[in-house]
Image: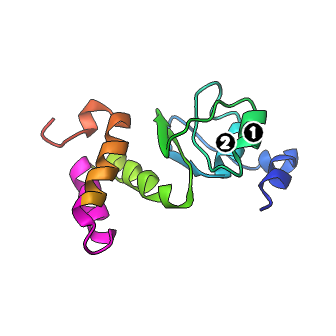
Amino acid sequence: MKTREIVADAALLSQIKLDLARQLIGAQCSGTLILAKLGLIGDLPACTDLTTKPWVIEAGVRVLDAPFVAHGNVATAGGCLSSQYLAGWMIARGGSIEDMQAAIHYVAPVGEKAETVERVTAVVSPFLAPAKATRAG
């Protein structure tokens, strides 16, 4: 609710220190606006929620009609339930796709485990480096 106030505060934003070379950075919904104002998205497309979308566009970012996108070490997601994609991406980047699938299976709703793992894998896999796609790869 206060994201626009936060991004208007240059002194506050200057305190956020992120290193794209060493960190995985994920933003969901209005967090995408913060990344845009920090200059971490640049001219790459991003995802956000429908409420924040006009402000992200105003910040110069092309917003995708998608739940998740990643570019290098930065990922953005749109919608409250898109957190599963951010979590899956971070787990797969830090470990393997098998690690991600096991974690998503564990937290997925009963009766929807296989479908949830399949969906998260399908959304996240295109944004993983080939070396992270599988441990065998």
Q: Which residues are magenta?
A: 96-114
Instruction: Name, please, the residue furthest toward the top.
Output: 43
- Does dot 1 land on a helix, a strand or a loop? helix
Q: How many marks?
A: 2
Q: Position of residue 65 (x, y in %)?
A: 55, 39
Tag 2 near tag 1, CB within 8 Å: yes
| Residue 112: assigned label | none
Residue placed at 25% from the left, 33% from the top?
131
Q: CA distance from mark 2 to mark 1?
A: 5 Å
Q: Amino acid at mark 1?
A: Lys
On residue 37, which mark appears? 1
Magenta span contains residue 65: no
Q: Identify the residue at image location x=65%, y=27%.
A: 42
For residue 35, which numbered disc appears in the image? 2
The secondary structure type at the circle numbered 2 is: helix
Residue type at tag 2: Leu
* In magenta segment, residue 106: yes
Q: Main secondary structure of the magenta part?
A: helix
Q: Position of residue 54 (x, y in %)?
A: 75, 41
Which color scheme does this rendered protein use? Answer: rainbow
Q: State the residue lying farthest toward the left.
A: 136
